[in-house]
Image: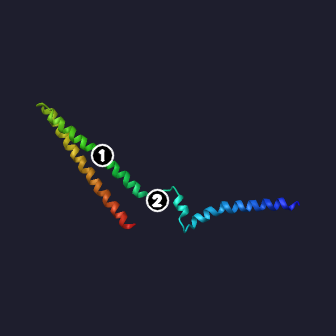
Amino acid sequence: MRGKPLTNSIRIAATLYAIIVAHPVLAAFDPTGSFASKSTLPTVAPDVYIFQIIFYVLGLLAAITLALIIYSGLMIMTAAGSEERVQKGMATLRWTIIGLLIIMSSWGIILFFNNFLVSLG
């Protein structure tokens, strides 16, 4: 009778061990996809997220550039004959257009690298 509780304990421990160990093993070999479908891990590559963030930032910069173009146009239109305000508005417009060219160039470079990486993968 003394051996019976020990045998039951060993059986319970072996069953629990098999249950705990079986899940990672089944996850490694998952022909039905049941474990993968329950996973909350992202299925998108990290470079896609990086490019999405870069495009978002460049779009935000383009919107700021549009606001600066409108601001410089208003500054020129409301100069009321003040040559200083016209010059300041023209300088703002000039630097804004240069910034827009830089933004568009960086957008093109990022698109080139994105397409290059996609063709490699």
Give the amino acid at mark 1.
Answer: Leu
Relative to 113, residue 54 above or below: above
Which quadrant, please, contains the N terminus?
bottom right
Q: Residues within 10 Å of mark 2 (few under 14, many from 20)?
A: few
Look at mark 1 in the image and give the residue it sits on.
61
Query: Which residue is drawn at the image coordinates 53% and 65% (left, top)?
Result: 33
Image-quadrant location for residue 114: bottom left
Q: CA distance from mark 2 to mark 1?
A: 29 Å
Query: Which residue is drawn at the image coordinates 24% and 43% (left, top)?
Result: 66
Q: Closest to the observer: 85 or 56?
A: 56
Q: Closest to the observer: 36 or 106?
A: 36
Which quadrant, please, contains the C terminus?
bottom left
Image-quadrant location for residue 108: bottom left
Q: Which is in the foreground here, disc 2 or disc 1? A: 2
Query: Which residue is drawn at the image coordinates 20% and 38% (left, top)?
Result: 72
Whether residue 88 is visible, yes or no, is no
Whether residue 3 is visible, yes or no, is yes
Tell me the SS state at disc 2.
loop
Look at mark 2 in the image and give the residue it sits on.
43
Q: Residues within 10 Å of mark 1 (few under 14, many from 20)?
A: some
Question: In the rendering, which numbered label is found on residue 30?
Answer: none
Q: Closest to the observer: 103 or 1?
A: 1
Image-quadrant location for residue 20: bottom right
Tell me the SS state at disc 1.
helix
Residue 47, x across and y down, in percent: 41, 58
